[in-house]
Image (cartoon, rainbow, N blue to C red):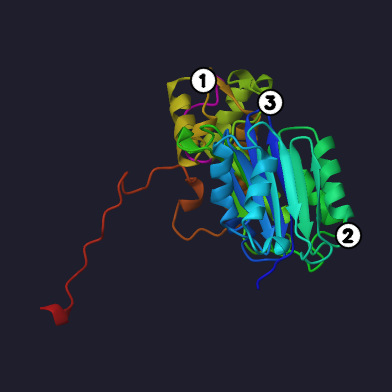
Amino acid sequence: MVRFGTFSIVAHDPDRGTWGVAVQSKFISVGAVVPWAAAKVGALATQAYANVTYGPRGLDLLREGRSAEEVVRTLVASDDRRDHRQLGVVDARGGAAAHTGTACMEWAGHVVGSGFTCQGNILFAPAVVEAMARAYETTPGDLPERLLSALAAGQREGGDRRGMQSAAMLIVREKGGYDEGSDRWVDLRVDDHPSPIEELRRIFRLYDLTLLDREDPATARPIEGEVAVALQHDLGVLGYYHGPRSGSWDAASRTAFERFLGENNFENKQRPDGKIWPSVMHYLAERAAAEVARRTTTAPVVPGALERGPGASAPGGDRSRPTPRKPSRRSK
């Protein structure tokens, strides 16, 4: 029998139409086992002596309109190893329910709140899930921030008493995936790391910067004046822009900026109103500063290479071409 200690939170944000699961465990690749979710359906976590069939079966029951309590009862009742299982479910309406089997390894238990449930096994103490619940209820912001805060709070109370290894966060929202092609709004895993929760938060910051649209629209800045000058400077340092730093956001400036966004996977951050998100502006400034540092501390290998920047065209043209090889004597 394979068991692994885990603490997780399953939750629903009705204001933003999101459902999600966040989890940490002293177990390799916990994200491959515990979290399950479907937009406008619900989410669940299966753990302890995890029954992975709870995932697809539970989501099917939720699609039928069953409540979280009904799903827990149905799954557990048909499982002859129910005493070794742990399960947390949140339904489409935010109803929450959980099960902790009597044979789960100590300490094991759960806390069910309004729109969420926290559960864990092989924990340092009951304070782990209690702290997770408090953090979730008191942390401002949307579901990613609240789930990450809950994980961190649980770890501060001792978490999995054997230590840390992996973490994951899965959040679904209708058409929330890349290019609206799926509902997987946030899907991140840390499969093996000495500080998996901190690493999960670091990866989420990069994911958020690149792919999500969570910034307050009121913070977007018009690209004009000093903002335009700063962008022209940074784009110039990186080799995307070759015009004057005039502050006039002309066609050449717009083309350079669009190419930078496309090459750096910021398509989701492109705005049609002539404004820029602060996060993109900060990222561009950081990249330009790093490029300046590279030029001043790195010895050139190819003449002129350090002055070009990553956005510059290849010196031999836009498309690389293979260099003809002279036939060897053996091939004659």
Position of the N terminus, as image quadrant, is bottom right
- The residue at which mark 3 appears reads as 15
Residue at the bottom extreme of this rendering: 330
Q: Say the numbered circle drawn on residue 125.
A: 2
Nearer to us in this view, 140 or 268 = 140
**Residue 280 % position (x, y):** 60, 34
Q: Position of residue 85 (x, y in %)?
A: 70, 60
Q: In the rendered image, is residue 147 in sight?
A: no
The amino acid type of the residue labelled 1 equals Trp
Quick one: label 3 or label 2, which is nearer the N terminus? 3
Looking at the rendered structure, the secondary structure element under dot 2 is loop
Per the picture, the main secondary structure of the magenta-coloured stretch is loop
Picture quadrant of residue 209: top right
Stretch in magenta: 238-249
Report the label total: 3
Callout 2: few (<14), some (14-19), or many (20+) C-alpha neighbours within 10 Å?
Answer: many
Q: Residue 249, labelled with which disc?
A: 1
Q: Is residue 185 above or below residue 249?
A: below
Kindly state the secondary structure of the residue where label 1 is placed: loop
Residue 23 visible here: yes
Q: What residue is at 84 percent from the left and 62 percent from the top?
A: 107
Q: Secondary structure at mark 3?
A: loop
Above or below for 276 versus 212:
above
**Within 10 Å of the Cα at label 1, are there few (<14), some (14-19), or many (20+) other Cα atoms?**
some
On the rendered structure, is 63 left or right of 302?
A: right
Q: Report crowding for label 3: few under 14, some 14 to 19, many 20 or more residues within 10 A (C-alpha).
A: few
Residue at 59 percent of width and 39 percent of height: 62
Which quarter of the figure has residue 17? top right
Name the one closer to the observer, 330 or 104.
Answer: 104
Callout 1–callout 2 Cβ contact below 8 Å: no
